[in-house]
Image (cartoon, grey):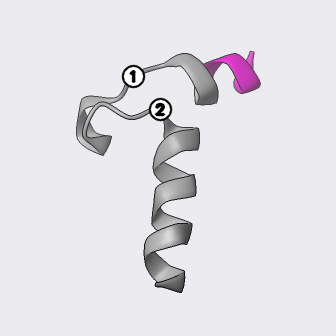
Amino acid sequence: YIDFYNNNRIHSALGYLTPAEYYQQSILQNVA
């Protein structure tokens, strides 16, 4: 359930990214 929730739920507070996508983007931005 948690995996589904993190990868498929679109979250308006994250700019309509899934939490997993948001996490990935934040990592890329922090490295850059």
Instruction: Specify the quadrant of the image occupied by residue 16.
Output: top left
Instruction: Specify the quadrant of the image occupied by residue 24.
Output: bottom right
At 24% across and 30% down in the image, what residue appears?
A: 12
Q: What is the C-alpha distance between the residues marked 1 and 2?
A: 5 Å
Q: Is 2 part of what is drawn in magenta?
A: yes
Question: Label 1's element?
Answer: loop
Q: Image height check: is 3 above or below 21?
A: above
Q: Image height check: is 13 above or below 10?
A: below
> Nearer the N terminus, badge 1 or badge 2?
1
At 47% across and 32% down in the image, what residue appears?
A: 18
Residue 12 falls left or right of residue 22: left
Q: Position of residue 30 (x, y in %)?
A: 48, 81
At 74% across and 25% down in the image, what residue appears?
A: 3
Q: Please, what is the dominant secondary structure of the magenta stretch?
A: helix
Q: Position of residue 1 (x, y in %)?
A: 75, 15
Q: Is 16 part of what is drawn in magenta?
A: no
Residue 13 falls left or right of residue 31: left
- What is the crowding at mark 2: few (fewer than 14 residues within 10 Å), some, or many (at least 20)? some
Residue 4 falls left or right of residue 10: right
Range covered by the magenta-colored residues: 1-5
* Residue holding disc 2: 18
Question: Label 2's element?
Answer: loop
* Residue holding disc 1: 10
Q: Position of residue 11 (x, y in %)?
A: 35, 29
- Mark number for residue 27? none
As drawn, the residue found furthest toward the front would be 32
Q: Are marks 1 and 2 in contact (CB under 8 Å)?
A: yes
Which amino acid, mark 1? Ile
Q: Viewer-proximal residue, 12 or 30?
A: 30
